[in-house]
Amino acid sequence: MAMVRTTCPYCGVGCGIVAQTGADGSVSIAGDLAHPANLGRLCSKGTALAETLGLANRLLYPEIGGQRTDWETALDRVARGFAETISRHGPDSVAFYVSGQLLTEDYYVANKLMKGFIGAANIDTNSRLCMASSVAAHVRAFGEDIVPGNYEDLEEAELIVCVGSNAAWCHPVLFQRIATARERNPALRLVVIDPRRTATVESADLHLALRPGSDVTLFNGLLAHLARSGKADADFVQRQTQDLEDALAAAKEDASSLDRVAAACGLDIAEVARFFDWFAATERTVTLYSQGVNQSTSGTDKVNAIINCHLLTGRIGRAGMGPFSLTGQPNAMGGREVGGLANQLAVHMRIEDPEARAQVQRFWNAPVVAGKPGLKAVELFDAVAAGRIRAIWIMATNPVVSLPAADRVRAALQRCDLVVVSDCVRDSDTARLAHILLPALAWGEKDGTVTNSERRISRQRAFLPPPGEAKPDWWIVSQVASRLGHAAAFAYHSAAEIFREHAALSGLGNDGSRRFDISALAAIDDEAYDSLPPVQWPVTARRPGGTARLLGDERFKGRFVAVRQRRVANEPDKEFPLALNTGRVRDHWHTMTRTGLSPRLSGHTPEPFVAIHPADAAAAGVAGGDLARIVSPWGEMIARVQCTGAQRPGTVFAPMHWTDAFTACGRVDAMVNPAVDPVSGQPELKHTPVRVERFTVAWQAVALTRRPIDVTGSAYWARLVTSHGWRYELAGAVVPQSWDEWVRTLPADERTGEWIVYRDPRHRVFRAALLQDGRLEACVLVGSDVTVSREWLADLFTRNALSAADRMGLLAGRPMAAAAEPGPVVCACFGVGEGIIRAAIRERGLSSVEAIGGAVRAGTNCGSCRPELASLLRAESGTGRAAAE
Ligand code: SF4
């Protein structure tokens, strides 16, 4: 067994992983006990990584116009396309759209080529969608993009305020660290500020389900309260901050009294007062925030409103306290460090600063350097649509799914003269529009560094050989740069070489004026790079082992920013009466290109859904389990209705993950408002006015098969991978002439064997199953709705032959015996379903999450499902909120 230490490719927690590769090529994945971010833990997504390493849907060879070609031809064509466009229309007519999935070294090279050699700054990243508002607010408050604290602060705090973050699902390992810290220290309180009652809320001491977008008022109210109640650290404020008066005046104007805050935020006065009192009384307070804060047209102001409260109380730069931005992607931070956003230069140097530009140009020995900020993500694709950008290179991301008003993005790319996509995925909504496809290495094959939310730089190391002709992203960019005439500046042979250059640049003219400084790593040799342990920047001659916390010294001068609550870009109205919030589910990542390959991850949320409050559902004429069409002024989607009291009235939630590869009309961003924050350019992904209406169908079906089936003709479909094939949810507007004929067209390659069929035309029920040598090959269950045990049916595919009882239950869609039905997956690690857990609670009188773990193992590995286990306990005991839903 070969063992390699690397880093998880998913969220910004940045967990260390130990990958072991067997002689037969098998891979096992475990958490790295020595990595400070996770200390051996992994969440459900990290645990299932080994299931996602296959080559299905991998792009293995360069392609032009859908035809395989060789690297030389493809690279020549890319370089010629960019060169001709630049020569005809100027450097601002080309763009790179990159990704927080790139490694720092890839990012560095792409940024260098665009800003230093093409001479434009039109390089932006999908990280614009996740943390640009935090970056902008950090720069306003700290003068630089700095996350001052670290994960240990969360364990040393006595109050954690979690704002706009479902950390239990989106940053699960960090949330488990918090949960463990709370077990050790029962005085550690958790306040969750979120319009939704998420899994994170399940263990909160206080939940403020505020009106969406009212965060600035809430924190302005807190600032005024802290000042009123004598909680300002006058010494700190006087010594290390500026502009308090303006910020306080704005706060008082915006949130003059508790009543006004409560009314503006749609909260109970007593709840607001309790939060304010707890914050005021607790020195060790960390405010943790994420996309619910950032993804807003007032995202930057929200972050500054939070930071203002920490500056006033001097709670920053010391153990157990501070504002803490949680990044979404594995290397959003690395991208920020190299300057991979359109409004940055490099290594925290400002693009507007002529001296900085001259220094960087000299360092790169570049012919030119971009003289002004480039286009930010949304405006960049608007420029593509307008024909101002004529050649675009998209690296490791899928903007046709993830950008707001995504149908506009698709249309823009369809019109663009040259679309180059470098990715590891062969078929994505964006790759389908590429003129040239360039195969990149995937996780497990790549080599470089990433930076997590606490500024910790970790190595991603390869443990798999490159498949096909796939290449590192930095190599691909360098080859194109070379063909554009810049061979000397891009003559890299390894990621280590690029890292050293990046580290050296970070120290350039840096007398301490920039905190981002890793110059102590500029001279490390290849061996030291290879064995580089996780380290938090700055890493300097004075601090060669890195720096745990920043902004705790006298050098730090913070700035209060006066912010006032602004109206959200588009309020719901009569035509679109509900506010749509979008986000992640527990077991999927971004556009599912990786997690969609894992059966155990796919089972937790099998299809796109819209969560809606029961009162809003009644008003819209939909019920739980229905299919609904959700419509906004920009587009629409179809999703399954989940009626839940966890949703604030007037709001709905839909997940961001589904693409055309997994469902019909399930791209939520097609309908998302493209309005952006005026400072950060981050889009309003959490607040789009929509209406929900019933999607009327004549029939619905569930089909389980060993092979993919043709879904054309279904008005709605969603598919997910199972351990033995595929599961489809289907629906149609017109009942077929003959179900018997229809069903035989589905499992395309399975036309022999024994069909068993049940028909009840009066009730529009049709059930059919195909058996070969006693083994189940496919089953299709049709009805006006299909309430069957999908998990039990899936389990039948694991048997070599069905028993008589199985065959009897098969067409009923559930077991004949009294055994518990598995139910939908709750614990992905051990595949434990809700039915099993509920039965265990009832029959064995279980009364704690630990007892459930002892009985059925659920929740005993990664812990991601523990909030759901707590919710099931309450539901079964009839005492909790879940029971009321
Ligand atoms: Fe990966 Fe999960 Fe850790 Fe995030 S919390 S880095 S997804 S293992």
Image: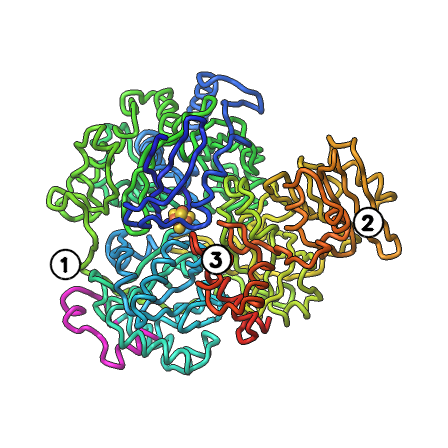
How far across and down, in percent of the image, does residue 108 sit? 31, 35
Using the numbered discs, state the Cα–Cα distance from disc 1 to disc 2 in whole angstroms. 72 Å
Count numbered badges in the picture: 3
Within 8 Å of ligand 1, the CB of disc 2? no
The kind of residue on which mark 2 rests is Phe
C-beta proximity under 8 Å, tags 2 and 3? no
- Crowd class of label 3 (few under 14; some 14 to 19; many from 20; radius 10 Å): many
In depth, the one of 740 and 678 nearer the eye is: 740
In depth, the one of 632 and 424 nearer the eye is: 424
What is the secondary structure assignment of the residue under circle 1?
Answer: loop
> Which of the two marks, 3 or 1, is nearer to us in this view?
3
Using the numbered discs, state the Cα–Cα distance from disc 3 to disc 1 in whole angstroms. 40 Å
Q: Which residue is mark 2?
A: 766
Is 845 rendered above or below residue 548? below
Name the residue located 49 percent from the left edge and 30 percent from the top edge.
420
Residue 104 is at least partly visible in this image: no
Q: Which mark is residue 865?
A: 3
What is the secondary structure assignment of the residue under circle 3?
Answer: loop
What is the secondary structure assignment of the residue under circle 2?
Answer: strand
Q: Magenta stretch?
A: 222-245
How far across and down, in percent of the image, does residue 252 sit? 33, 77
How far across and down, in percent of the image, does residue 454 sit? 29, 51
Using the numbered discs, state the Cα–Cα distance from disc 2 to disc 3 in whole angstroms. 36 Å
Name the residue located 28 percent from the left edge and 54 percent from the top edge.
147
The kind of residue on which mark 1 rests is Asp
Quadrant in which residue 242 is drawn = bottom left
How far across and down, in percent of the image, does residue 11 sit? 40, 48
SS assignment for the magenta stretch, majority: helix
Name the residue located 47 percent from the left edge and 22 percent from the top edge.
468
Left or right: 699 with respect to 391? right
Q: Which mark is residue 553?
A: 1
